[in-house]
Amino acid sequence: MPSLNPRDPFLSKLASLAAASPRPSLPVRRRKTRTCLRISTYSTPQAHGDPAQVERSVSYNEHRPRKPPPDLPSLLLHGRIVYIGMPLVPAVTELVIAELLYLQWMDPKEPIYLYINSTGTTRDDGETVGMESEGFAIYDAMMQLKNEIQTVAVGAAIGQSCLLLAAGKKGRRFMMPHAKAMIQQPRVPSSGQMPASDVLIRAKEVINNRDTLVKLLARHTRNSVEEVSKVMRRPYYMDSMRALEFGVIDKILWRGQEKIMSAVASAEEWDRRSGIKVVDGM
């Protein structure tokens, strides 16, 4: 090719224009980068990322539970509260006695609060679900403890549960205003195909349990054995006021409830005013 003439006016003009104008930048295709955590190559590796992502992760970790939450009986046990809310079956008896012993081991001087809402060793329809020894086991544990046990009836205290209610510390046995207490004779479990001799043995055991229950109720309610045996011939229901009069409890847990209920006539007084005669055999 022939050499370019440096004195060519056209080439000189192009050279001056090129020197005066900036060099055009060619379009560069950038690869899309994802925002992700990366580990730096320092001596102490740290996770880096955008501030929003780091803040979310920190706040989430702060509110995450370090361990599983405790169950409700454990929370109540922390407040020295033992709650009996089921019939006295072996599993319930085991748990209640274990909680009582644990609270005594933690502090033998602080009181224990026993809340009762149980039908005893029977269900509400009268079917036997546990042996009478279940209630006696909790009673014996209460008598052996060094702590002061305050009992509170919530809902119902029937049969053996009524004994536990009355076995609390004198002056510290309470009852909710609309709770019910009831004492009754122990029931014979289903005999099924049992021989007659075995049925007789079970019947004698039930009679012994009844006599024991009568003696314990008479001791804690300060009534005579004859009086307790008389009212236990049939199921004897007591509201809060009648339980207070019978000696099962010492106080009703409702402010002003004693004054309100004292002005209300009893069921017998209502029958007398209405002219209703109650047959002794009923």
Image: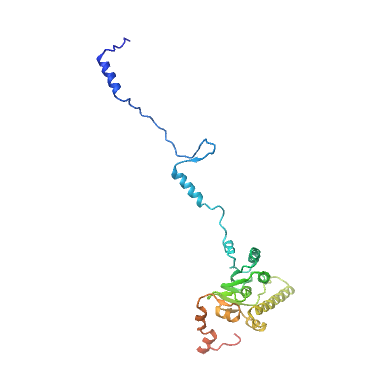
Q: Is residue 60 left or right of residue 228?
A: left
- Residue that appears at 49% across and 47% down: 58
- Residue that appears at 58% across and 63% down: 78
Residue 230 percent coordinates (x, y): 64, 83
Q: Is residue 211 left or right of residue 85?
A: right
- Dividing the picture into quadrants, the one containing residue 147 is bottom right
Residue 151 percent coordinates (x, y): 60, 72
- Dividing the picture into quadrants, the one containing residue 157 is bottom right
Q: Nearer the viewer, residue 15 or 129?
A: 15
Q: Identify the image quadrant of the C terminus.
A: bottom right
- Dividing the picture into quadrants, the one containing residue 141 is bottom right
What colour-coding does the image apply?
rainbow
Residue 50 percent coordinates (x, y): 44, 42
- Residue that appears at 51% across and 89% down: 273
Residue 92 percent coordinates (x, y): 63, 66
Q: Nearer the viewer, residue 95 or 51?
A: 51
Q: Identify the image quadrant of the N terminus.
A: top left
